[in-house]
Amino acid sequence: MTEIIFVKFLDLIMNKLINEFEEITRWPKKRIDKEFIVNFLSTKFQSGIEYSEKEVNLIIKKHHIFNDIPLLRRELISKKYLARTQDCSRYWKN
């Protein structure tokens, strides 16, 4: 982890966006914090693996506690961290 990313990670922990269990506690207001949170969440997916929507939801659920799986899934897709089939049946890390 580069120093800048590590400092930002510590900042997010101090602002209580990520708790000590590496769970996202709330959706941030600042754009830069949103981007970091989505990037952080994307690291929980492995390249080269296809996931069902249910599997994606379970991974997201495991790493956040504010109960908005659809928001985080949409952000992962819109920011191109994850891609999916048109029928949304399969997802993979970009």
Image (cartoon, grey):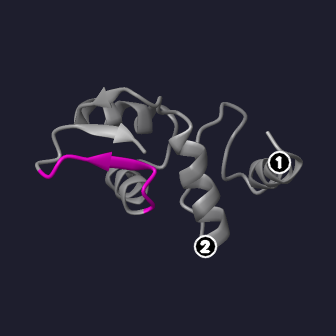
Q: Please report the bounds of the magenta region as a residue range.
A: 79-86
Position of 80 with respect to 32 (left or right) is left
Q: Position of residue 73 (x, y in %)?
A: 36, 50
Q: Nearest the camera: 19 or 31?
A: 31
As displayed, is residue 57 above or below residue 33? above
Prevailing secondary structure class for the magenta stretch in the rendered image:
loop
Residue picked out by circle 2: 31
Find out whether residue 13 is within the magenta segment: no
How far across and down, in percent of the image, does residue 42 sit? 51, 43
Quadrant position of the N terminus in the picture: top right
- For the C terminus, give its image quadrant: top left
- Neighbour tally class for label 1: few under 14, some 14-19, many 20 plus, Cα within 10 Å: some
For the point 76% across and 57% down, the residue is: 15
Q: Can residue 25 be seen from the camera position used here?
A: no
Instruction: Note whether 1 is above or below 16 in the view shown.
Output: above
The picture quadrant where one finds residue 61 is: top left
**Amino acid type, label 1:** Leu
The span from disc 2 to disc 1 (Cα, nearest Å) is 17 Å
Q: Secondary structure at mark 1?
A: helix
Asked if residue 31 can be seen in this view, the reply is yes
The answer to whether residue 27 is left or right of residue 54 is: right
